[in-house]
Amino acid sequence: MKTDFLIIGSGIAGLRAAIELSRHGKVLIVTKDKSFESSSSYAQGGIAVVIADDDSTQQHVDDTLNAGAGLCNKKGVEVLVKDGPSQVKQIIDWGVRFDRDGGEFLMGLEGAHSRRRILHFKDSTGSEIVRILRKKALESRNIKKLSKQFVIDLIIRENICIGAIMLDEESGKVYRISAKAVIITTGGAGQLYLRTTNPSGATGDGIAAAYRAGAVLSDMEFVQFHPTTFALPGVPSFLITEALRGEGAILRNSEKKRFMQNYHSLAELAPRDELSRAIIKEIKKCSTDHVLLDATHLNPSLLKERFPATYNSCLRHNVDITKEMIPVSPAAHFMIGGITTDTSGRTTVQGLFAAGEVACTGVHGANRLASNSLLEGLVFGARTGVAAAEYSKSANITDIPLNKAERRGTKVSNKSGHISLNTPKINSIRENLKRVMWNNTGIIRSGASLEEAGEIIDMLTQEISNHGLTRKELELANMLHAGGLIVSSAIKRQESVGAHYREDFPKWSGKKRHIKIRKRPPC
Ligand SMILES: Cc1cc2nc3c(=O)[nH]c(=O)nc-3n(C[C@H](O)[C@H](O)[C@H](O)COP(=O)(O)OP(=O)(O)OC[C@H]3O[C@@H](n4cnc5c(N)ncnc54)[C@H](O)[C@@H]3O)c2cc1C
């Protein structure tokens, strides 16, 4: 297949880039799931943007820099915050609804924001934005979307990205797509961890593929854990939005005592890393597996109207949040590091662009400010579209014969060649990886726990060395790959800053350095 622009992923960043690029040529969006399935669709709390009279660009920049714990790329933050209002106005013009009181927008408050600046649509903001972006994208005759298509690897010739190797999940067929420019918007990697808020497809595929293609990655040690996710045994963890704390919900330990005021001056609205660590400490202190989020003192009709998804999800598990406290504990939520890009989505590989959660522009520093990532998807998705369009003027669609490895790949059906692992084996390796990432590379780490994680991941990688080309196996290989990269970066950062906390180095050195990694080219 051939196209001008190949976009991998149909979340907010991919859709926004596609809309931009549709004015410049044929756009093909491929996605491994149904097109609606992405973190973007699950985003609840809202999108941070400066539109209130009592707010200013400087205040949003400062809040983002403060949350980022000294490691933000200031120029990137300024771009994010300054481009934000026009990008948000654009999607409102396209039809996105945000909650209003009369004509005025209702602005929510979230952790580490000094102002109410979160636009929201009940607690389903992401799906509302994705609904409209999809509609807008489908209106364009230049945009084509293909679901259930898994990107295995990027095709690189002479250090230029010219397409991708794909798996059609239903037929098992492997094929190539050639493009003038490839834009990765594959989102995060929360599935690497035992407890996560992320959808099942968040397996770090884009990060692993870009690394294999020779792109530089940055800040992989910074994984953000969301402090409050539903925690009942046997129930998959789902997010309890930060906005609930913004409205006044209180954290209590198992003795029903409020504790956050002992840890941080902002109490329940402290940055997420501080909250997550405080909760883990309280959980250990009280020998339990969760703490409690108390919203019972809030107006029941506010809870039902403003947070209908949270209210109903909890009720489904017999917790009526208007009357009962919610059992919560932290879970992996957001990949702060990723593929190094400039503020226009250019990676270090020509022809390869990245935007959204998979990219690392440096705007989140060592810790992301709440509700800045939907904004990131919009702002950098659009800017990446502009840059990829510009790049394409001097690029051709290359018709290059398959190299040896790819020829082998196309021949490998799942019946011959490589050995397909059976499902129990895949599940058991996946479970082991998730467990070691959670226990050894989670909210609190140490040199010893990280070294052990590295050894276990190497062992697990050996076990799948001859895996087949089913989606499950490819995902597992990517998870192991991305997990290994997180571990090796975390080993290198011998200090604690933002989301990266090491017991053996509990203080920040004060040095503003970034850990960058790149696969060595073969000799
Ligand atoms: C439960 C939850 C709540 C959140 N709430 C908020 C919030 O209120 N505000 C906020 O700002 N942020 C929030 N976030 C974070 C935010 O939603 C994400 O960071 C953001 O939506 C990521 O967008 P994206 O376009 O980069 O990636 P995604 O939306 O994750 O999209 C990734 C896409 O890539 C595709 N893909 C992945 N791998 C492959 C492959 N190998 N081949 C083909 N396709 C592939 C996927 O199918 C998907 O279409 C939340 C996240 C979660 C999980």
Image: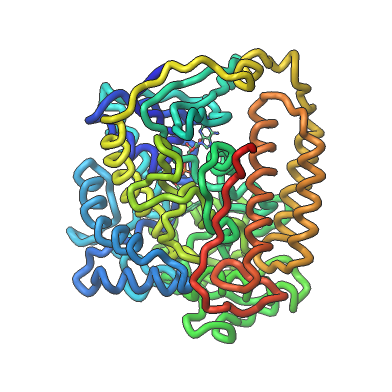
Q: Nearer the viewer, residue 381 or 117?
A: 381
Asked whether, in this view, residue 394 is left or right of residue 447, the answer is left
* Position of residue 226 measured from the top left corner of the image (x, y, whole percent): 56, 62
Q: Quadrant of residue 104?
A: bottom left
Asked whether, in this view, residue 291 is left or right of residue 74, the answer is right
Task: Note whether residue 112 is visible.
Answer: yes
**Residue most toward the front?**
523
Q: Nearer the viewer, residue 427 or 207?
A: 207
The front one of 34 and 311 is: 34
Give the position of the C terminus as an image quadrant.
top right
Q: Which percent across, then down, holds residue 298?
A: 45, 71
**Residue 63 screen position, x and y as percent:** 37, 72
The residue under the point 27% across, 72% down is 58
Q: Nearer the viewer, residue 456 or 163?
A: 163
Residue at horizontal 19 percent and vertical 60 percent from the top: 102
Residue 199 to residue 435: above or below:
above
Q: Quadrant of the N terminus?
A: top left
